[in-house]
Amino acid sequence: MTVQNNTDGSIEKRAGSISCNGASDRGIMQKPGEPVICLVDAAPLLHDPELSVRLTAGISEARRAKYNALSAPKDRALSLAASLALDCVLHTAAGMREKDSAVTYSQLGAPTLSGKYISLSHSGMLAGAALSTAPCGLDIEQPRYLPHKRMLALSERFFSENDAETVRTADSIADAFFRIWTCREAFMKLTGNGFSMPCDSFCIDGNAAVSGEKIYPIRTYIKRGYYISVCSTSTLTAQLPEPIDPRTLGRFCRASTGISVHSDGLN
């Protein structure tokens, strides 16, 4: 199959990474024409309330309201981590701060910004954000134990017939289930339709989502035990960065500027 490449207007310049105590393997994933992706470890936010207070001062009122509306500490930590990841990709790819941007949210809760496509995801203690000038989708899933019978039943209910067959015949049912699950969610986020899409309207074929005559590249990464899938209308070749520890961002956080990201900016 030939993968269709719809990258008109895609990001062309390469930005620097976030400064994390000199750790060059942590920061922003970006290659020309591909989505910009940032992952943030939410665990330190769960265990350090003072850090969370400092960092919430640097996010938008809308994201802060969402954070304050949550009661469970874990949910708050994940919400804040997603806000930090969004701030990172916006600053790196568009030279703007999340708190100063015109990001709005659809009825389904999907973030939108004129001329940009944004996807947020979180699971377990990991949150991430993807941003591109072309449609993109990001999904993170922390695998949990499920009996094979349960995974097969979920596949039959929520996957296409082809995808359910892939899970049934896989050497590792669990690996196939979580890979396809995250790939399907990433594609549904790319379309903006979410679970309103009919299960059989698309399937996962190797490293692509196939919907009718259209083909969308997908790449799945396993990072710290999490399944992380990215779907785009452009090819995907970049390696996923290590999650950022928000404690390394605290020293850079200012109520007026958010997180300090070292970047040459994108025009």
Image (spheres, rainbow, N blue to C red):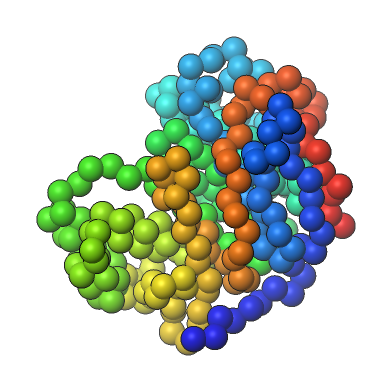
| Horizontal side of residue 22 vs 238, given as left or right | right
Query: Which residue is outermost to the left?
Result: 149
Q: Quadrant of the C terminus?
A: bottom right
Q: Which residue occupies the foreground of this view, 250 or 68?
A: 250
Which residue is rendered at x = 38% and y = 68% of the image? 197
Q: Is residue 260 visible?
A: yes
Coordinates of residue 16 in the picture (x, y in percent): 79, 45
Q: Note whether 189 is above or below 208 in the view shown.
A: above
Q: Note whether 46 is above or below 118 in the view shown.
A: above
Which residue is rendered at x = 78% and y = 32% of the image? 260
Coordinates of residue 235 in the picture (x, y in percent): 61, 70
Query: Which residue is outermost to the top?
Result: 50
Which residue is rendered at x = 46% and y = 59% of the image? 220
| Horizontal side of residue 134 vs 101, given as left or right | left
Q: Note whether 125 is above or below 159 in the view shown.
A: above
Q: Which residue occupies the foreground of this view, 200 or 152?
A: 152
Please tell me how many numbered marks the rendered image carries. 0
| Horizontal side of residue 251 vs 231, given as left or right | right
Coordinates of residue 29 in the picture (x, y in percent): 66, 50
Q: Quadrant of residue 3?
A: bottom right
Q: Is residue 118 visible?
A: no
Q: Quadrant of residue 206?
A: bottom left
Coordinates of residue 216 in the picture (x, y in percent): 52, 74
Which residue is rendered at x = 70% and y = 39% of the image? 24
